[in-house]
Image (cartoon, rainbow, N blue to C red):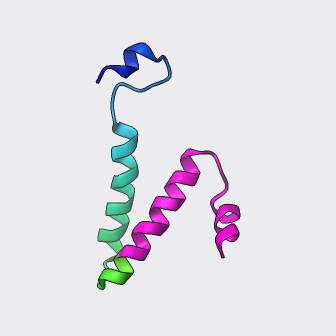
Amino acid sequence: MFTYVLYAGDPSTNNDAENSVRKGIMHRNVRGQMKSEKGMRRLSVFLTCFETWRIRGLDPFTELAKYI
């Protein structure tokens, strides 16, 4: 629970994770076009991949090209 005390680089809050999720939720709510379960699943996967690559400092389009 207090790993941030033992490890200097660890944050004491989960704000980064919450902000990452918030971006996807806001995008979904604003667009409102994903009415089907299949469409929502695809959007969730894409947003998760793009956010993970951003956090890791990778270029999302280069990474996406590897899977297409």
Q: Does the magenta stretch include residue 8?
A: no
Asked if one can make out residue 60 in the rendered structure from this viewpoint, the answer is yes
User: Left or right of 52: which side holds 59?
Assistant: right
Query: In percent of the image, x 53 and y 60: which residue is there?
Result: 50
Q: Does the magenta stretch include residue 48?
A: yes
Horizontal and vertical percent for residue 36? 30, 85
Compared with residue 40, is residue 51 higher up or lower down, i.e. above or below?
Answer: above
On-image quarter of the N terminus = top left
Classify residue 56 by image quadrant.
top right
Query: In percent of the image, x 38 and y 44: which residue is there?
Result: 17
Horizontal and vertical percent for residue 57? 63, 45
Compared with residue 35, is residue 15 higher up or lower down, i.e. above or below?
Answer: above
Majority secondary structure in the magenta region = helix
Magenta residues span 41-68
Query: In percent of the image, x 33 and y 54: which residue is there?
Result: 22
On-image quarter of the C terminus = bottom right
User: Left or right of 58: which side holds 16?
Assistant: left
